[in-house]
Image: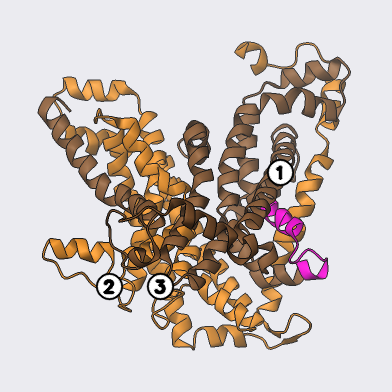
Chain colours: A brown, B orange
């Protein structure tokens, strides 16, 4: 595009983007700082009075500081799930790529099944109750690991293929055992893909709504997405508080996006172009 | 380097070479396999049995295909099945078209390209529940921002979520709004992989911008297209969060999808029926999405 066309197209693009993408976010922020009466009108207007601090305090302290508990729960959930995912899926990706075995076909099939097939909910609950994992935060951690393994293994396997085997062999000749080869030679080399896994999976698990809804019932255990869901019915007239809560839970992904933009896009488009 | 790695080992005797397999021990699979096997594979396989039972979680009575018969007898359950397919087709189709157009725009020399890319992509990272609640407020039939905006243009806006015929499509629009950024970055990666030489050669031959889109960009971004269709079609079939936060399947049962039916039956204590819903969803994905992905990938090979 050249000259006038370029500016005309750009102007049109920004005009549309403003209405389609900016207005909803502006609406969230503006509603979040209004007083209750003005927010209930649901219109797109400038707040007559700003209630940033009042609304924030009220959202945080409602139901016995539920939002704070939920933030702690969500953080524990996200950090532990992602840590386990990184180690376990890198181990699988490593052996799966390096070791030739007749089982590889079956393993690849199970990985693809995990990407496509939704989990069977009630049997999972029944099983978790049987082994005492239902309604426990660590139970949900293991669930998140199970459901996100496939994607992470695929990322790791593709990346490990680019690391020359000669490196493993050199370490073996120097006397390293299997654990030494993996943890001291290979895992550090996987850092670029590990960074991608950490960023993409953190956002996915932090934003997860369905699995906590099914497997972690109860107010004490609520994760941050469930507070929003619970407040949806409680705050039917207090839209300002509901939207303040949305602002709160949007901040972590926003920070991740600002600092790790590249890793996110790398992770989400990985393997999609060359198949 | 490439020459050496391409041929046989240089410093290792062949016995040691075979032995090296033991440095990639199979027990590395173990932690992942235990978690995946117990919490994903086992429930998935046992769901086939439980879907054939009347089930209270404590004991189950085998009733054959009765749950499935009920699934295809109740009008609201069939509605859920039809809605699921409509939702998946509408959202994946729109994401392909809009994603490709946006990707072409965002790989051209549009002003402040990085900013525009960020704006389009950011909704992907925002909580689905938050997006759902926001659009419920914006789609309010009389007070909502969307209808008030339309009113300024002299258009009488519809009851986005209150009209039973429209509700599922309104949720689909929000799903597209939230997901189109992902489709766009996948297409952008696909377009970036096309060698610039092709465009230069076409330019020398005097093609119009539309022709180079039609004969270069479109065919060569096929792998990206396949990914976007497959990803968003499967995502569409499995959709739950937006439906549940925006309409709870209502008004009536008009916007129910299989995943919301599964949740409703679970809440009502019909565990066998809920699990049958899960099996129906497996079958739907196996029958629609798997062949679609195989077909798309094969055709790519022929070109």
**Callout 1 crowding tier (Cα within 10 Å): few <14, some 14–19, many ≥20:** some
- B254 vs A26, nearest the viewer: A26
Q: Earlier in the sequence, mark 3 or mark 2?
A: 3
Give the label on residue A96, or none: none
Chain letter of disc 2 in the image:
B
**Callout 3 crowding tier (Cα within 10 Å): few <14, some 14–19, many ≥20:** many
**Residue at image point 58% right, 52% down:** A115
Instruction: Answer above or below: position of A91 versus A208.
Output: above
- Nearer the observer, disc 3 or disc 2? 2
Give the label on residue B83, or none: 3
Spatial CA span between label 3 and label 2 = 22 Å
Spatial CA span between label 1 and label 3 = 38 Å
Left or right: residue A52 versus residue B214 is: right
| Residue B141: image location, x then y, percent | 27, 72
Identify the image quadrant of residue B168: bottom left
Identify the image quadrant of residue A218: bottom right
| Residue B160: image location, x then y, percent | 30, 70
Q: Is residue B81 magenta?
A: no
Spatial CA span between label 2 and label 1 = 55 Å
| Residue A219: image location, x then y, percent | 66, 67
Residue to which mark 1 is pinned = A104
Give the label on residue B141, or none: 2
């Amino acid at each position: 595009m050249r000259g006038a066309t370029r500016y005309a197209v750009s102007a049109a693009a920004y005009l549309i983007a403003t209405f389609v993408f900016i207005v909803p976010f502006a609406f969230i922020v503006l509603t979040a700082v209004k007083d209750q009466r003005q927010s209930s009108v649901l219109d797109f207007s400038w707040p007559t009075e700003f209630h940033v601090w009042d609304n924030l305090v009220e959202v945080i302290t409602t139901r016995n500081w539920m939002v704070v508990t939920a933030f702690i729960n969500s953080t524990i959930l996200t950090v532990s799930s992602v840590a386990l995912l990184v180690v376990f899926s890198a181990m699988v990706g490593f052996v799966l790529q390096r070791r030739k075995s007749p089982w590889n076909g079956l393993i690849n099939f199970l990985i693809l099944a995990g990407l496509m097939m939704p989990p069977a909910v009630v049997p999972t609950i029944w099983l978790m109750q049987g082994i005492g994992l239902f309604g426990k935060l660590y139970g949900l951690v293991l669930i998140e690991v199970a459901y996100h393994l496939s994607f992470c293994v695929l990322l790791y396997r593709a990346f490990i293929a680019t690391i020359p085997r000669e490196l493993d062999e050199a370490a073996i000749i120097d006397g390293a055992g299997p654990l030494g080869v993996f943890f001291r030679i290979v895992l550090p080399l996987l850092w670029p893909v590990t960074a991608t896994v950490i960023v993409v999976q953190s956002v996915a698990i932090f934003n997860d709504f369905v699995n906590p809804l099914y497997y972690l019932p109860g107010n004490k255990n609520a994760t941050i997405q469930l507070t929003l869901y619970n407040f949806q019915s409680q705050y039917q007239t207090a839209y300002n508080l509901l939207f303040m809560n949305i602002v709160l839970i949007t901040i972590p992904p926003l920070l991740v996006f600002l600092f790790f933009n590249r890793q996110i896009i790398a992770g989400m488009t990985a393997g999609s172009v060359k198949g | 380097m490439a020459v050496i790695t391409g041929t046989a080992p240089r410093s290792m005797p062949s016995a040691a070479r075979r032995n090296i397999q033991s440095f990639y021990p199979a027990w590395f699979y173990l932690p992942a396999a235990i978690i995946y096997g117990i919490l994903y594979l086992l429930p998935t396989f046992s769901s086939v049995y439980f879907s054939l039972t009347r089930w209270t979680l404590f004991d189950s009575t085998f009733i054959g295909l009765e749950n499935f018969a009920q699934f295809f007898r109740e009008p609201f359950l069939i509605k859920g099945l039809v809605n699921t397919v409509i939702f998946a087709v509408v959202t994946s189709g729109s994401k392909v078209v809009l994603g490709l157009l946006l990707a072409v725009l965002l790989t051209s020399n549009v002003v402040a390209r990085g900013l525009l890319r960020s704006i389009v992509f950011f909704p992907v990272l925002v909580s689905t529940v938050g997006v759902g609640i926001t659009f419920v407020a914006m789609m309010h039939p009389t007070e909502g921002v969307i209808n008030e905006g339309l009113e300024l243009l002299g258009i009488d806006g519809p009851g986005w979520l209150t009209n039973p015929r429209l509700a599922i499509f309104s949720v689909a629009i929000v799903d597209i709004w939230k997901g189109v950024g992902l489709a766009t970055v996948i297409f952008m990666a696909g377009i970036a992989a096309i060698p610039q030489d092709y465009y230069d050669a076409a330019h020398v031959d005097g093609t119009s911008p539309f022709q180079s889109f039609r004969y270069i960009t479109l065919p060569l971004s096929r792998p990206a297209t396949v990914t976007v269709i497959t990803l968003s079609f499967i995502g569409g079939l499995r959709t739950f969060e937006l439906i549940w936060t925006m309409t709870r399947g209502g008004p009536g049962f008009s916007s129910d999808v299989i995943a919301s039916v599964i949740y409703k039956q679970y809440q009502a204590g019909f565990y066998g029926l809920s699990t049958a819903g899960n099996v129906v969803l497996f079958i739907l994905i196996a029958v629609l999405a798997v062949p679609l992905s195989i077909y798309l990938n094969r055709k790519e090979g022929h070109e």
